[in-house]
Amino acid sequence: MATTENKRRRLSSGADRKPSRKEILERKKAIDQLIRKAVAVEDHLAQFSDFHKYQRNVASASHQALFSRPIGFSVYLESGHGDQLTSPVRKYIQNLLKVNMEEHYGPEWPSEEKVKRREMVAPEARYIFVKQYSNGFITENSMKRDAEVEHMRVSCNKDCLLGFVHYRFVVEEELPVVYVYEIQMEPSAQGKGLGKFMMQLIEQIACKNKMGAVMLTVQKANTEAMAFYTKLRYVISSTSPSRVDPQIGLEKSYEILCKAFDSEAKSKLEVSAVAT
């Protein structure tokens, strides 16, 4: 009887014991290696041929009858690095962020804009750019010009930028994750399924590189974005201010969302969100 009890105690203590310093350091080293390996990949997009292009027919039958070639939405994707952005592309990103986000940030925008301008050119910033073919489908934007949108358009190798995703490989709660800093599309490119397509690509990149989750920050005032991510099965993370401390959460203007891919990531990043 005493032998059985001793075994039970040993099993219990083994399950509950804290990891040793050596184990903690080894785990940290393994995570750092995963991050370095992911960052070392020059072009993540190259690994996913199904995501090199996105095409959708958005024309009605009456529109089709008016034009000799198809009217639709056809774009291709390209990768980029924050410390390799050209001056026109940097300006494009700054303008698109202002057009899309200034209203949602409200009085916080001036200070937030300064932060974003520093983030966008950091060496660790990775990009997927959305470009429209110069000789491809006619888009709705080419039939109806919008002054504000046209102001921020930039010509890049005769093709036109329509949006971008800025993401990074980082550590959150001692887990390797992909953090989406920005996903921004021109108004003319919204509502065509492109945002979902881009997030699916980011999730593929995360899984390919053995990241535990995809995370991002959303302004509470941006209700359309919140609805969009909820539809894609993102949840408020246990790291979000509203989950850490409801009182602090009330004072903050944002939520942190996540989609975890394994049990450990779910337990660390989603549990309290699910339990609430």
Image (cartoon, helix red, strand yellow):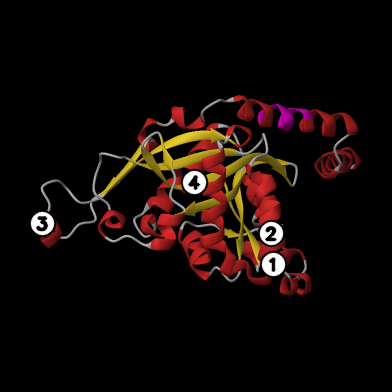
Query: Is residue 261 at least partly visible in the picture?
Result: no
Q: Residue at x 52, y 41 (%)?
A: 88
Query: What's the CA distance linking mark 2 and mark 3?
Result: 45 Å
The magenta span reads 29-34
- The residue that mark 2 highlights is 112
Specify the label residue 66 is tagged with: 3
Q: Residues within 10 Å of mark 4 (few under 14, many from 20)?
A: many
Q: Are marks 1 and 2 in contact (CB under 8 Å)?
A: yes
Q: Are marks 4 and 1 in contact (CB under 8 Å)?
A: no
Residue 85 rendering spot, x and y as whole percentages: 57, 36
Amino acid at circle 1 = Glu
- The residue that mark 1 highlights is 108
Q: Is residue 130 left or right of residue 61?
A: right
Query: What's the CA distance linking mark 3 and mark 4?
Result: 32 Å
Q: Secondary structure at mark 3?
A: helix
Amino acid at circle 4 = Phe
